[in-house]
Amino acid sequence: MKRLTSKKIESITPYAPGKPVEELERELGISGSIKLASNENPIGPSPKGIAAIADCIKGLNRYPDGAAHYLKDAISEKFGCSPPEIILGNGSNELLDIIVRTFLLEGEEAVYAEPSFVVYKMSVQAAGRKGISVPLKDGKHDLAAMADAINERTKIIFIANPNNPTGTINTQAEIGAFMARVPEDAIVVVDEAYFEYVTNPEYPDTFKYLRDGRNIIILRTFSKVYGLAGLRIGYGFAPARLVDFMNRVRAPFNTNSIAQAAAMAALSDDEHVRRSVEVNEEGKKYLYAELTKMGVDYLPTQANFIWMDLHKVARKLYDALLRKGVIVRPMGPTQIRVTIGLMPENERFVKAMREVS
Ligand SMILES: Cc1ncc(COP(=O)(O)O)c(C=O)c1O
């Protein structure tokens, strides 16, 4: 009998998506719950993006523009890169997979932090390759330890900046020192899914490494500040020689026409971005103050979520919050990650926390 799949694939822990809210509510016999579990934009999608969707529906009998010319032009204009340096994916999630499938060859290894975005590990495992995880230090990527973990087999290093789930960043100086230690033939993937929310002036300008001709891939997404998570569209910047190979691996129509149209419109929706960041800042300040009052140990965030260490089994608190209709994300044995919501949602979370703690 042939094996159905490889042992490596059998050993992958499936990604645990949050259950649909309706299903959770049915199970618990509750209604009106709030979801603060997936780092989504609480103010909703960009209105300009929504309008663009309505306009493109009548053309759905046609395949999308597989090269996404217009969207790439718009991205290149906004960020000052040329279209051949841009790659689009069905969410930045798909880009992670494409990167691994394109570049992580047999016998080569990847390095990533733990805890960080789980898809790095999952993509590497799914490709049957070896990943080395390096623990965070004080909630941040320990870039010195990650550089120490690089060996002659290391091909890809993943850095989430800001990191999910901790919301921390690595500074320009830290990334600079790290890049100086990375061999020229390794590829550094810097995942900047939350960069629009960053307020720390020491946040790195990673385009510098692209201009220097380094093997760097900078990942961004329309899922967070632009509020288009449901459409699945992300983008990346890399030297044209890398983009060329990734384009050979990706499916020809990996981003759909609705997503391309909405993303293009959202990109110019400065007011929606400004408002999204403002709501996040307001919620962040409120939650910091309330968590401090409650004595909850949290990490200051540069993203749209806050990581909290409860110093007791997180699952119990998660279940208790759930019964009150507040959905957060358990993260590790004693930690939870909570997305910053609209003010009434933040207040409801705080009230529920007080009741169940
Ligand atoms: C660090 C990080 N990278 C990538 C993603 C995936 O985003 P997308 O919706 O573009 O696939 C997420 C989503 O939560 C994330 O937290």
Image: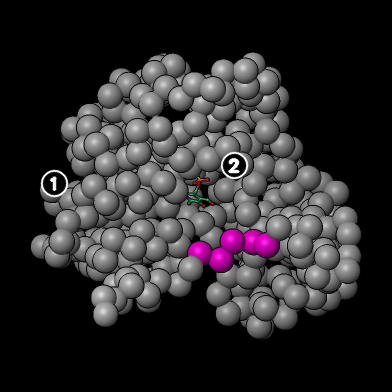
Q: Is mark 2 within 8 Å of ligand 1?
A: yes
Q: Residue at x 21, y 49 (%)?
A: 103
Q: Position of residue 310 (x, y in %)?
A: 67, 76
Q: Which residues are magenta?
A: 15-19
Going by the image, does 138 lie left or right of 258?
A: left
Mark 1 or mark 2: which is in front?
A: 2
User: What is the basis of the colouring in this image?
Assistant: one colour
Image quadrant holding the N terminus, namely: bottom left
Main SS of the magenta part reads loop
Numbered label tally? 2
Depicted 331 relative to depicted 34: above or below: below
Name the one closer to the observer, 257 or 47. 257
Question: Sequence order check: which comes first, mark 1 or mark 2?
Answer: 1
What residue appears at the point 74 percent right and 37 percent down from the top-left corner?
43
Residue named by callout 1: 184
Which of the labelled discs sits on residue 229, or is there none? 2
Residue 291 percent location from the top left of the image? 74, 64
Q: CA distance from mark 1 to mark 2?
A: 34 Å
Tell me which amino acid carries mark 1. Answer: Glu
Mark 2, secondary structure of its residue = helix
Whether residue 18 is in magenta: the answer is yes
Q: Type of residue at label 2?
A: Ala
Q: Nearer the viewer, residue 81 or 281?
A: 81
